[in-house]
Amino acid sequence: MTDNLTKDVPSPPAGEGAVPAQATDAPATDAPATGAVPAATGAVPAATAEAGGATRGRPAGGGDELVRVTDLTKLFPVRRGTLVRRGAGAVRAVDGVGFAIDRGTTLGLVGESGSGKSTTGRLISRLLEPTSGSVVFDGRDISHLSTRELRPLRRDIQMIFQDPYSSLNPRHTIGAIVAAPLRIQKQVPRGGVRNRVRELLELVGLNPEHYNRYPNEFSGGQRQRIGIARALATRPKLIIADEPVSALDVSIRAQIINLLDGLRTDFGLTYLFIAHDLSMVRHLSDRVAVMYLGQIIELADRTDLFEGALHPYTHALLSAVPIPDPTSHRRRERIRLRDEVPSPLDPPPACRFHPRCWKAQELCRTEAPPLLERTPGHQVACHFPEKRDVV
Amino acid sequence: MTGPAPTGTPFLQVRDLTVSFRTDDGVVHAVDKLSFSVERGRTLGIVGESGSGKSVTSLAIMGLHRRGRRVGIDGEIRLDGEDLVTAAAERVRGLRGRRMAMIFQDPLSSMHPQFTVGEQIVEAYRVHNRVSRATARRRATELLELVGIPEPARRLDDYPHQFSGGMRQRAMIAMAVSCNPELLIADEPTTALDVTVQAQILDLMRELQKEFNSAIIIITHDLGVVAEISDDILVMYAGQAMEHGPVEEVFAHAEHPYTWGLLQSITRLDRQLETTLRTIPGSPPSLINVPPGCPFHPRCTYRELAGPAASTVRPPLTETSPGHRVACHLPVEQRRRLLREEVTPTL
Ligand SMILES: Nc1ncnc2c1ncn2[C@@H]1O[C@H](COP(=O)(O)OP(=O)(O)OP(=O)(O)O)[C@@H](O)[C@H]1O
Ligand SMILES: Nc1ncnc2c1ncn2[C@@H]1O[C@H](COP(=O)(O)OP(=O)(O)O)[C@@H](O)[C@H]1O
Ligand code: SF4
Ligand code: SF4
Ligand SMILES: [Mg+2]
Ligand SMILES: [Mg+2]
């Protein structure tokens, strides 16, 4: 029965054999030594840069970590394509990413399409195997576990996807879908599977009597609730939610966000929340990481990020969010990025953002800015970080 | 955008537009007695959740519904005084692409995959302009340049799939404005795009409007986009208009409980953080079984205040201040008090 359930349960990595597995001790990154880093400008004290001492992919942590990723890298070799491109023949989907998520907190992951958010999520849930770097979950390095070794881990890490339509098998009843992770894990909850599923349905605001119905009988919001019930079935510790509300209507979004928020409090869940809606990320996250072309360019507590962003790209993102107040655009400063995100096959050298950055200097074109801690807990990868009022 | 103040007959006038589809499951009342108008140089934003009839409305204006037994269209759609509902299909086709044009949400599905972007713009242009291929190609290059595509002469020979989402949307806009249409309808033109690219596209539409003085209808479910680009806003629910008026007035003094619900349930960067979001209970109805009376009543917090009429009598769209119209049974004074005392403090 397991093979019928492929749609009900995120499957283990397919074709991972093709991916060159590397030793856990990751190769050195191209981050320059701390000595080469210029002093920060303006508003940001340079002293803390040294005090923090964090280099790219190596975040400063504290608290009770559930997840820590270090120098995480995923390259997708380009198979077809006759064009000979400069540099490696691989998409650098995730390139030296590092952060930690404390237990019971939510890390929001934002960035433009193709910046590597979903790939990061899939690496942490080990639907993908990292090319290099490591994922430590609950104290254990899971970077290169085999499919068999991963099985018990799937209980602890669950995913919620964007599209409530395609992520549920249309031929299975709601009961079977929600129970699938339990079956696969061979977990029999006290009171039996059926009771547990009813509880779960109730928990996410669905009628437990709908146990025998099929997904097509439910609206988008209800299907997303089914996806959430399924993710909760095994009592996971970490939930990776990849654009969980993007496909939903405005009035339904708030319902689902409240549900996710409540579940976190009730069950002490930890979330990696991937979304491109920055105001939604602000609402739900404790910390926020901004990605650009496979790298984290800024990482900070929610308030620091939304009120004191230091990276020009973060400024551009925030400035582009439309504000539902017709009088606001008259007083708001507008930052418009030129062009679009360059290809991750051949990312620009040094600071990857420099071709679109209005502040770019010679240094930006020759040296990659490392991700440095500028104030406690606030890391930014820019040679010239400064605050700017953009909302 | 601020265009000229409305004078005389509006450039586009839609009156009591009704569109229904006969399906195996029953009749879909997709648009029901919808009325609005748009002047040259001005932008109307239509907001509503999925299935509220936004796309059906725009396709009706463009004459793109297949006429026949299964589709029923009633009411008036007047473009510069001429009624398009009763006009011959031939006539409407002639206006399309010349006086009015449309931009779709997903340019990939509305562009032909086997022709280059350039060929498609050239074709679109030559339908209405008797010019040589070479001239049309020159025009196509200008258009790609106008919409901000770098190296336009070279990109002309690319196929749509070689363009990014944002570039495809620009190319689509280039095609739509190739004949300087007086009416441009953009159906969720930025929904599939990143915020950064969305901002570029909205700027572009604004600039083009300034240049061509066109009337624009932008359809979206994002209240932020409406606030940013529109002069007027029309809030639709279940194929009907709930509220309509100048954006500044409606955002500052919304009077319909559904509009309140939308404004309350969104997260926004320009506000303090809230602990829990306010929600609208339930979900939008099927347009085969539209609730009787006020279509929003099953989800409305205030339906009791309106008495039994809420579920039996359809509230007419009534003007409550100049240009501001609302379809709700509650007395104006009561709505304004609710807005002041209960709604505004939560926004
Ligand atoms: N299986 C794959 N093979 C090749 N390239 C891939 C694969 N999966 C992702 N990529 C590429 O890796 C990069 C990052 O993709 P990813 O899906 O992580 O982006 P994202 O940030 O989630 O974007 P979105 O906002 O569009 O969901 C992109 O350039 C993408 O095309
Ligand atoms: N050709 C059609 N036949 C039957 N029903 C249709 C057709 N086109 C649209 N509808 C229905 O009309 C309603 C309004 O649709 P639409 O205008 O596309 O909504 P939206 O506001 O999301 O653009 C929906 O219930 C939709 O399913
Ligand atoms: S390092 Fe230079 S180019 Fe990069 S973001 Fe900072 S200022 Fe811009
Ligand atoms: S008419 Fe009644 S049910 Fe409809 S919006 Fe007004 S108060 Fe609510
Ligand atoms: Mg993604
Ligand atoms: Mg639509």
Image (cartoon, rainbow, N blue to C red):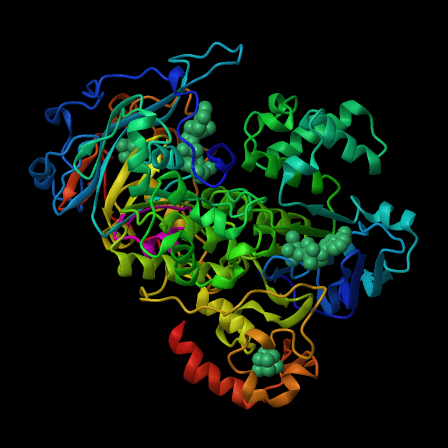
Residue span colored magenta: A270-287
Q: Quadrant of the N terminus of chain B?
A: bottom right
Does residue B318 appear left or right of residue A16 in this picture?
right
Q: For this rendering, which residue is in front, B213 or B231?
A: B231
Q: For this rendering, which residue is in front, A269 or A188?
A: A188
Q: Residue at x 51, y 60 (%)?
A: A250
Relative vertical location of residue A374 with respect to residue B269 in this rendering, above or below:
above
Q: Quadrant of the C terminus of chain B?
A: bottom left
Q: For this rendering, which residue is in front, A314 or B265?
A: B265
Relative vertical location of residue A317 with respect to residue B27 in this rendering, above or below:
above
Q: For this rendering, which residue is in front, A85 or B44?
A: A85
Residue A36: quadrant of the picture:
top left
Does residue A68 appear left or right of residue B60 in this picture?
left
Return the x and y of residue A249 as percentages of the image width and height: 53, 57
Residue B297: quadrant of the picture:
bottom right
Furthest toward the front, the residue is: A191
Residue B303: quadrant of the picture:
bottom right
Magenta span contains residue A278 = yes
Does residue A132 appear left or right of residue A196 in this picture?
left
- For residue A360, say whether it is visible: no
Q: Residue at x 39, y 38 (%)?
A: A184
Return the x and y of residue B144 as percentages of the image width and height: 63, 32
